[in-house]
Image: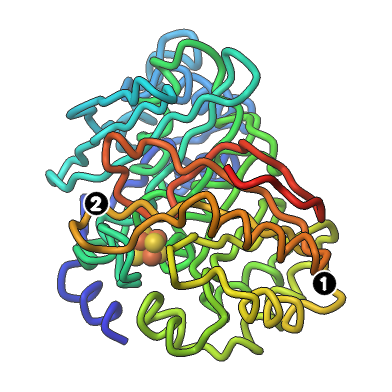
Amino acid sequence: MHSTVVLEAVGYSPSRMLPHVLALSPTELVEHATASGVPLRIEQARRILVDAWAHPGRAPSRETVGARTRAAVASLLRHERVAIVERAVDPGDGFMKYLLRAADGAEFEAVRIPLHRPGRFTVCLSSQVGCAMRCDFCATGRLGLTRNLEAAEILSSFLAIRDEAPGRVTGAVFQGQGEPLHNYDEVIRAAERLRDPCGGSISGDAITISTVGLVPQIRRFTAARLPFRLIVSMTTTDLQARARLLPVASRFALEDLADAIRGYQASRGGRVTIAWVLIAGTNTSAREVERLGELFAGVPIIVNLIDVNDARDGGYARADDIERGRLLDRLAAAGIPFIRRYSGGAARHAACGMLAARRVDVGPAVPTEPG
Ligand code: SF4
């Protein structure tokens, strides 16, 4: 696959000899320190990690462990942070978009998203520098893949944003640049550390991982019985349109994708969120809704409608109120619940058409007025 070739050609190898403190669990830290000749108890490891998450970029402090152990453990780990290069707030919605820079100079983005509850935020995280999925409506997809992000880089981006948020960050969504399941191991490691009480202390239910629809990775995710939520981007059920809009994802048969989603739902329960990037004149027809109903007959889903966010002149346009309203009515008539989400940061040209979004309109099987 094209993406594999790119990864091998430009894969980033920072000082791999040392693990980054943010990427380790307490048990892993004990094992790493002990194997390196520094005996460490699990409670000491927990204190070191809590301290590292409270003060990212700093070596273990005096309070966590004794001075000799502290220095020895510090020398066994990396502690570097990603740097904030630029911030841009959208005055209309309060989304704060960040440009971040990793140690090798690679730049990527993340977005702080205000939740409905005042003083609460979630962070939309990138999983890769660029993306290999080449979704045609997405600015990141047109850039191609530069490299995967390490779990520690993802977590450092989260902490950079958390630490200057004017309130509490209570969630994370892997829905920024990159296809999270194309960087499966590092993304899952990052999600696990976000959930760890010695790490981000975020509920697994508040950690969402999106995918453009990589069937083997969805099955792997399901088999691992992970506590995180999965959102699958479908966008269209028309095979020709899929080949154009989602060229990599379209290599998987729709029936296989639906089967993988059915397996995920069966293992977890609840509704599966199906993301639908709404594009004028492209994926709003009655036939789309009909096929969606057929594919997911008997599977509880909720369709998450996101307006396309294409910065390219003459590219894909957002559906107007009338066209969007027709689609919502069709979904309602078919008994398919939907959420219309606001694709934030448009004024700042948020790069990914799937960028995280906040709920503006919930319409489970209820006709919705256009607009
Ligand atoms: S929409 Fe998401 S998966 Fe598709 S190219 Fe953009 S970043 Fe990659």
The image position of residue 320, as x and y in percent, is: 46, 52
| Residue displayed at 27% across by 58% down | 140
Label 1 packing within 10 angstroms: few (<14), some (14-19), many (20+): some
Amino acid type for the residue under numbered disc 1: Val
Q: Say which of 13 and 343 sits in front.
A: 343
Extreme residue in the front direction? 322
Label 2 packing within 10 angstroms: few (<14), some (14-19), many (20+): many
Total numbered labels placed on residues in the image: 2
Quadrant location of ligand 1? bottom left
Question: Could you tell me if the residues under marks 2 and 1 are in contact, i.e. CB atoms within 8 Å?
Answer: no
The image position of residue 215, as x and y in percent, is: 57, 80
In-image side of 98 versus 283 (left or right): left
In-image side of 137 versus 124 (left or right): left
In this rendering, the label closer to the viewer, 2 or 1: 2
| Residue displayed at 28% across by 65% down | 141
The residue at which mark 1 appears reads as 299
- Tell me the colour scheme of the image: rainbow
Give how far apart the Cα atoms at labels 2 and 1 are.
35 Å
Sequence-wise, which precedes: disc 2 or disc 1?
1
Vertical position of residue 54 compared to residue 356: above or below = above
- Image quadrant for the C terminus? top right
The image position of residue 10, as x and y in percent, is: 16, 68
The residue at which mark 2 appears reads as 311
Give the label on residue 90, or none: none
Identify the image quadrant of residue 36: top left
